[in-house]
Amino acid sequence: MFQPVSLFIGLRYSRSKKRTGFISFITFFSTVGILLGVASLITVVSVMNGFEGELKKRILGVVPHVIVSKEFNNSNQDNFKTWSALREQLLQQQHVEQVTPFLSSEALIQSAQSLQVVLLQGIIPEFEQDNIINKNIIYGSLNSLSEQAYAVVLGRSLANKLKVSLHDTVRLVLPNKTIFTPMGRIPVQRQFVVSGIFDVGSQVDDVMVYMHSQYGAKLLRRKGDGIDQLRLYLDDAFNANKVVDRLTTLKKNKISMNKLTFTTWSDSQGALFSAVNMEKKMMWLMLSLIVAVAAFNIVSALVMVVIEKQGEIGILQTLGLSRVGVIKIFITQGMVNGLWGVTLGSIFGVLIALNINEILAVLGVNILGGGYAVQVLPVQLDPNNVVVIILSALMMSFVATLYPAFQASKTQPAEVLRNE
């Protein structure tokens, strides 16, 4: 099969066994270094993607992507009476998949053994069937809030702190709302029955308490259903700003949307996701440097090969091989080593990423710590990331070959062959 002379000679040099042991040693470890760097980068990035995906699902599955609230003034504290009609309008907006009404307030929850600060949410269970809370109920049901008066659903972590279980009684206290009694001014409070326990697997399990909005309104001394906010769930939480910009434009043109305020999830959770994104970028940088160091070991190996092959380079030049041809020879030789490292590293990286939990189980390694009952790392292998890693490693290998190849092309045949 016909091959360009530079490619043919470069491939022969890469397969040659007649080289000093030290050169072979450096070449081998430069290839192994690229292999380990690429495999590590693919594995770590896949796990980081998995953690980011879990954060989106577990936190942004509960935290509203956009909250629509009505602006109240001191003279008009009426409830959000038009929320039903507004909900239909919001459902027509692009990227909006679900709109659910709710009321919200800070509260204290007390059991016989403990007292905890919580965020109280009054909901209408009929609108919450696709909620991640409803999908992660482990005891009771979310619909029990409609079937039973003064019932609450709370997280398993919170239930453990309060040492309560299904059908136990807890007391909800509103420290910011007080009433006059014969004994003086006391906070608003009432007993509720635990009718459901959920386990989402995030900090939501520690702080969220759900009840029917009807009973939440009574607790908060509001009229009607007490609804004062609408929460929007989008096809992608990161479209929240686009949706808010669109709603802000509509607000200016529609009287029905006057006195509405819009809040996105980034106001409360943005710092967390920014930290995760920064950590992900730093992992990219550190592991990319490992690949770069391994790739530039090719420089050392090729420089010594060039010195070893000085006579052969001179002979090839006297036979008519151009300087560009000499450069192509050593680029080919260096890229063969880089290609082997990148190919094997990609294969190993993908296999490790897809089977990392099984590998850790066999090795008996506990990464998440003893506080987690199920030791499973979330893994999300993104083909686009794999392609970027492969192309970046190949580019580093290519750049590493340029200096030795250029030095080889500067060989002067007369000087080299004078003593041959």
Image: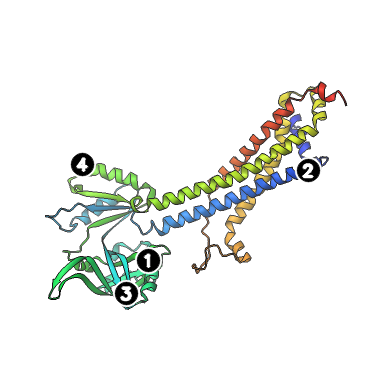
Label 3: state its secondary structure.
strand
Residue annotated with mark 2? 22
Q: How crowded is the residue under tag 2: few (<14 C-alpha within 10 Å), some, or many (20+)?
A: few
Please state which amino acid type lies under the numbered disc 3.
Answer: Val
Residue annotated with mark 3? 194
Please state which amino acid type lies under the numbered disc 1.
Answer: Asp
Q: Nearer the viewer, residue 128 or 103?
A: 103
Q: Position of residue 208 (x, y in %)?
A: 33, 65
Q: Where 30 sits versus 407, above or below?
A: below
Q: Earlier in the sequence, mark 3 or mark 4?
A: 3
Residue annotated with mark 1? 206
Label 2: state its secondary structure.
helix
Which color scheme is applied?
Answer: rainbow
On the picture, is 116 further left or further right than 219?
right
Quarter occupied by residue 247: top left
Q: Where 202 sits versus 13, above or below?
A: below
Q: Earlier in the sequence, mark 1 or mark 4?
A: 1
Tell me the tag on residue 253: 4
Label 4: state its secondary structure.
helix
Q: Nearer the viewer, mark 3 or mark 2?
A: 2
Q: Position of residue 217 (x, y in %)?
A: 20, 65
Q: Position of residue 213 (x, y in %)?
A: 24, 65
Q: Nearer the viewer, mark 3 or mark 1?
A: 1
Residue 294 visible in the picture = yes
Q: Earlier in the sequence, mark 2 or mark 1?
A: 2
Q: Residue at x 78, y 43 (%)?
A: 22
- Label 2 to label 1, Cα distance in Å? 60 Å
Q: Earlier in the sequence, mark 4 or mark 2?
A: 2
Q: Nearer the viewer, residue 229 or 288?
A: 288
Q: Position of residue 119 (x, y in %)?
A: 30, 63
- Label 3 to label 2, Cα distance in Å? 72 Å
Q: Nearer the viewer, mark 1 or mark 4?
A: 1
